[in-house]
Amino acid sequence: MTLQQLHYMITISECGSLNKAAEVLFVAQPSLSGAVKELERELGITIFHRSGKGVTPTPDGAEFLVRARQVYAQYEELAEKYSKSADIKKKFGVSAQHFSFAVRALVDMVKTYDISKYEFSIREEKTREVIDDVATLRSEIGILFFSEFNRPVLAKILRANDLEFHSLITCNAYVYLYKDHPLAGKDKITFAELSPYPCCSFEQGDSDSLFFSEEILSGNEYPRYIKVCDRATVLNLMVGLNGYILCPRIICSELNGDSYVAIPFADDAVNRNSIMEIGYITKRHAVLSSMGERYIAELKEYLSHTPSQMA
């Protein structure tokens, strides 16, 4: 087994296709297929399941890839430190639920590096995918939230994947909507006042469970409901349909613009507010890379300047 083989396997898993991986690696597709078969024979396992739609790791392959990423990351650390002539780009990846502040922190972080010498990735994804990315080391850090509702389920999933949660900030729910929305001038907004307007929610695919929802009050009954895939669509629906989303009061106007406002959600006896605890996940007992440490520092710095999150 060689470092080149590990690099090949990691790239194939990230591309999801032998043809795409061959293009990225600048090798012939038959040569790459041969490398996979040779390593599978050596290890005595099948790393990838091949189909007409591409390749996906087998259970044995997924376990192998976790270890391969660990080994290759250590090699990159050594090469960066001791091999001055090595033409290796240091990689850093973060996966997050749809939080604009997670992107803003990466923007602030990347500005401090020579981007020609590094490879940065940020993935806004479904909750389950955020967990899977960190579990398989596709990303070093994942950003998500706990609430009273989802904590028991998500905490169990994190333990099963040898992950741990690190708290960053706690907050109550705010109603995030367009500045010209009929309710935008109110000091607080009740659930009853929201009923004529569509609530936007990020869809969760095959894991479409309330426990994976990215909205803090996902257990409530909403008479009007629209599922979306990305933050840009949410913002468009806020303008076009007077839609709204329930989220923390962390508005990144530098990225989303200043056309949106966050107003406190006024709970009642039936529709109670809930504390949202936003944090990041890592492999248990993992030592963050220098870039991981810098990213978390940027997150904390940005969040420290947000208005008070607790009502």
Image: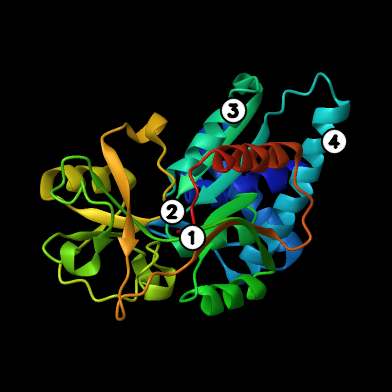
Give the percent coordinates (x, y) of residue 115.
60, 22
The one nearer the camera, 8 or 159, is: 159
Q: Quadrant of the C terminus?
A: bottom left
Separation of residues labelled 2 and 1 (CA atoms): 6 Å
Mark closer to the observer (4, 2): 2
Disc 2 designates what residue? Answer: 125
Q: Which residue type does callout 1 highlight? A: Glu
Disc 1 designates what residue? Answer: 129
Separation of residues labelled 4 and 3 (CA atoms): 22 Å
- Look at the numbered discs 2 and 3 and tell me whether their residues touch, using CB distance below 8 Å: no
Q: Which residue type does callout 4 highlight? A: Leu
Disc 4 designates what residue? Answer: 78
Residue 110, numbered label: 3
Q: Which residue type does callout 3 highlight? A: Val
Q: Secondary structure at mark 3?
A: helix
Sequence order check, earlier mark of 4 and 3: 4
For the point 71% across and 28% down, which residue is it? Answer: 88
- Look at the numbered discs 1 and 4 and tell me whether their residues touch, using CB distance below 8 Å: no
- Look at the numbered discs 2 and 1 and tell me whether their residues touch, using CB distance below 8 Å: yes
- Quadrant of residue 255 within the rendered picture: top left
Separation of residues labelled 4 and 2 (CA atoms): 31 Å
Name above or below for residue 221 compared with residue 51: below
Give the percent coordinates (x, y) of residue 60.
65, 69
Sequence order check, earlier mark of 4 and 2: 4
Query: Would you say 186 lies left or right of 66 here?
Result: left
Residue count near mark 2 (Cα–Cα under 10 Å), binned few <14, some 14–19, many ≥20 = many
Q: Can residue 86 be seen here?
A: yes
